[in-house]
Amino acid sequence: MKKLIASIAIAVASAAFAGETPVMVSLVTPVQAPDSSHDVKGLRLSLVYGDCGEFTGLDLGIANRTRGNFTGLGIGGVNIASGRVYGGHVGLVNWSDYGASGWEDVSKGCQIGLFNRAGSFCGLQDGIVNISGGTFTGLQSGLFNSAVNVNGVSCGCYLFLGVNVATGRVRGCQLGLVNYAAEMECGVQIGLVNIIDRGGWMPVFPIVNGSF
């Protein structure tokens, strides 16, 4: 037993020395152990607000910030990642800006909350407001869904009650009360008001509009 405890202690110390830690506990940064310069591979508990470098594992707290890439599951009031996200964020606000203009460094996973913000993203955004600052591939479901390019489905929640906006091109479906696409490359809009600037059957048409 003593050897096991000693081995664990040595492993933790070695990881901390290398700039990594298996456990991080934060009250309000900088009141946390270890400090925010460390990467976390394991578990982080942010009692109020926590900050770290790269993150891999389970992230729990009121406000969680990752300055590097995030891999794993984050559950909290506010989840912020400055790098790519591989996994899931569940909270009131989920925010990631990485890959805002391109597909090369796309985040993959899900954002579930009241307000979801991502750069280029592949997966699920489910909330009241969903915003992708780049190319979105997958399903957006909410009262307001916005992306530059859409590959997939933008759907108003509650029987398609919602507004869907694509400032670039759409390949897929927009389902809501009001749907707007700057360009419809291949897809359909179903809603009360359907607007397509370029490539649609009609510039504005009720019920159904699209291009194939």
Image: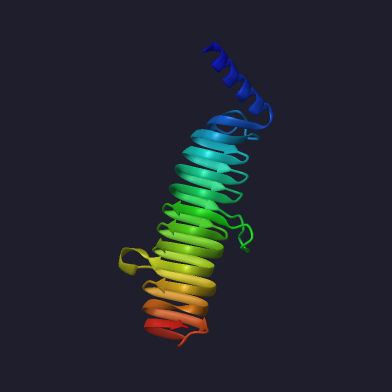
Q: How was this image coloured? A: rainbow
94 in relation to 122, above or below:
above
Quadrant in the rendering for residue 159: bottom left
* Place of residue 137 in the rendered image (x, y in percent of width and height, measured from the top left): 51, 64
Q: Residue furthest right?
A: 18
Residue at image location 45% in from the left, 42% down from the top: 76
* Place of residue 97 in the rendered image (x, y in percent of width and height, measured from the top left): 58, 55
Quadrant in the rendering for residue 144: bottom left
152 in relation to 184, above or below:
above
106 in relation to 3, above or below:
below
* Place of residue 18 in the rendered image (x, y in percent of width and height, measured from the top left): 69, 30
Quadrant in the rendering for residue 160: bottom left
Residue at image location 48% in from the left, 85% down from the top: 200
* Place of residue 31 in the rendered image (x, y in percent of width and height, measured from the top left): 57, 29
Q: Residue furthest left?
A: 159
Q: Is residue 144 left or right of residue 158?
A: right
49 in relation to 178, above or below:
above
Residue at image location 50% in from the left, 48% down from the top: 87
Q: What is the number of callouts on the image?
A: 0
Residue at image location 57% in from the left, 29% down from the top: 32
Q: Nearer the viewer, residue 155 or 172?
A: 172
Q: Residue furthest top?
A: 2
Q: Is residue 197 left or right of residue 155?
A: right
